[in-house]
Amino acid sequence: MPKEEKKKKVNYADLSICTSTVQMLQKIAEDGYESAFDRALDLKPCPIGSDSACCKNCSMGPCRLNPRDPYSKTGVCGATIDTIAARNFARMVASGASAHTDHGMSMLDIFRGVVNGEIKDYQIKDVEKLISVAESIGIETKDREIKEIAKDLYEELERTYTQVEGEIPFMKRVPPKTLEKWRELGIVPRGSMREIMEIMHRTHIGVDQEYSNIVKQCSRTALSDGWGGSMVATEISDILYGTPKPLQAPVNMGCLKEDEVNIIIHGHEPNLFESMLAAVNDPKNIEKAKEAGAKGINIAGMCCSGAEVLERHGIPHAGNFLSAEAVVATGAVDIMAVDVQCIMQALANLSECYGTKFITTNPRAHIEGAIHIELEETNPMECCQEIVEMAIERFKNRPKRIVIPRREDWGIHGFSHEYIKYMLGGTFRASYKPLNENIINGKIRGAAGVVGCVNARVKHDWVHTEVVKELIKNNVLVLQTGCSQISLAKAGLLKPDAAVLAGDGLAEVCETVGMPPVLSCGSCVDNSRILVAAAEMVRTGGLGDSIADLPLAGAAPEWMSEKAISIGHYFVASGVYTVFGVTFPSIEGTKFHKHLFEELEEMGLGKWGFAKDPYDMAWMMIEHIDKKREALGIMGKKERKLFDMADRRALPEEHVVSA
Ligand code: BF8
């Protein structure tokens, strides 16, 4: 079928519940271009690859096994389905962990430059946080100069990456019982460089060919991400740019301004955004924009870069990963500047179609067709100034037709774990005790982290939204990060009055404390905030001795990136039941699958789960939370389930959407 004809048949409202995105997808099609949603329709996923039944680790292959009869064949070298799937999984963990740990390392490089005086454009903004992080890993702070503490902190945290033997510094934050389990299983991370290197070695042809031993190294590597690289990224970003506190901020494309110069920052590391904020607020630049006929300069975020400044400064957020092309299609974006991760290559061409200047700024991520202006940490303003000037130039030559969806959704963002503690306990008694007590008395059934990507293979934003609605309706407090929280912000669930959608117990707690039932915690590296919160819940007492005892579950309902696999696996290794949607890279019935989905829990860790249907996903989590409550002896009288898994299974599959 000719492309044009085919495009006319697509009803974009079937592919996303974000009305702004739908409006712009329609515009992209009408303008004769295509988006990831169109490409997903054109390009069916390879069924063998989706089941992880293909090995291309050497040139005797690629060897494709039969997913329907996975033990009927092996690869040329004799690798079984369990070895092949475990190796593929391990390489996803390694790649995802690399992304987060390399991001964390960049933050640490900047911190070192600030401490040594080589970098002057960033400063230690949050001294209180610096001291608390230092103390949490045993650095003496009493009667010492801030600079001395910061230097020790830098040197200590560098071990997170470079250490070849011993335990990484943030192991001191892990509840003792959890750490004891990791030591017993031999999965305490040394340094992330060593763990990632070892995964790449072990998954080479002819090395580790026992799935459970491969998974052991997955756990060690993923933990070096969650309790290592990601945690360093979060903590150093807070020290340099401030620890988030709740604030009200808008999300969605209505934040673009027709009469202002619009700059979108997309990617992951907060440095570019922080420097761009300084540049757009420079009165000289505002004056230049006015001379060009604009009312001012407007800056907004996308994806995790956006989530960082949304949480810290209340800067508007234009949309999550899958809305990036839609935002460009407004024609109103004068510049989209990016750094690393989750930047679709297609943005370069599409930007050209709409006259948007598309700028790469990081030496690790050039994109064909983009203009590269490198951000030097020692002189970030040079790059940012050039970007602002280009944006003003583009404003002068904007295309005539600009279409901005008018929608803005306001919500509360910025729930760092420090603030959650303060919010619950007050300034002088900051504590997780009220949370634990409300879980013990049953008003709150448990907590869930619903996080991660959006994926063009399922209905955009819909799966996230339905999972979260079902959880809060059943008194589960939800913590969010990444693209997921933007989905829920657009659905209006990050406002205190969303408590009307919560069950009676959770609603009562939300009303008393004045918080929404869904807490927006930041970017994907900020999943480390959820780990710290979980450790704090254990330390507070009454909910068991290890993270695996907590009535806690996690989900990435629309995941797509390798980073999500690393995150999922560090939650699992930390003791959390973690349910993924869309697809899962293993075949049910294989030994590898059973290991991830059952045996890890029997070993005292968490376990993986998988469901496509959001209500199934939510109920798998709720039933797990109830199982943990039973084990803790806090189940009380059995709550009446309005609609449980058995009811769900009896229903036809009308809620499962595939694009
Ligand atoms: O790191 S949630 S689509 S933007 S990978 Fe990417 Fe996924 Fe979004 Fe943030 Ni995280």
Image (cartoon, grey):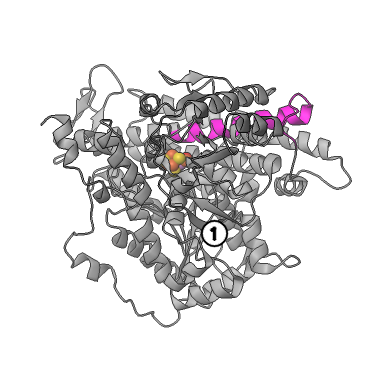
Counting from the top left corner in percent of width and height, residue 317 is at 51, 45
Which residue reaches farthest left? 1
For disc 1, the neighbor class at 10 Å (few under 14, some 14 to 19, many from 20) is many
Query: Does 249 appear above or below 109?
Result: below
**Is residue 83 at all visible to an observer of this figure?**
yes
Give residue 206's quadrant in the image. Answer: top left
Rendering coords of residue 20 (x, y %)? 37, 48
Direction from residue 591 to residue 221 in the image, left or right: right
The part of the image, by quadrant, that contains residue 192 is top right
Camera sees residue 624: no
Q: Where ligand 1 lies, by image quadrant? A: top left
The quadrant holding residue 52 is top left
* Identity of the residue drawn at 67% across and 35% down: 278
Task: Identify the magenta region.
Answer: 96-123
Which residue occupies 27% across, 53% down?
A: 612
* Front one among 4 and 181: 4
Q: In which quarter of the image is the N terminus?
A: top left
Where residue 193 sits in the image (x, y, percent)?
54, 28
Based on the picture, tell me whether residue 405 belongs to the magenta stretch. Answer: no
Residue 217, given in percent of the width and then of the height, sits at: 44, 37
User: Which residue in the structure is indicated by mark 1?
Assistant: 546
Magenta segment includes 120: yes
Question: How many labels sit on residues?
Answer: 1
Hey, which residue is sitting farthest top in the picture? 59
Between residues 229 and 13, which one lies in front from this camera angle? 13
Compare residues 351 and 182 and report the one nearer the observer: 351
Quadrant in which the C terminus appears: top left
Q: Please, is residue 485 above or below residue 52 in the view?
A: below
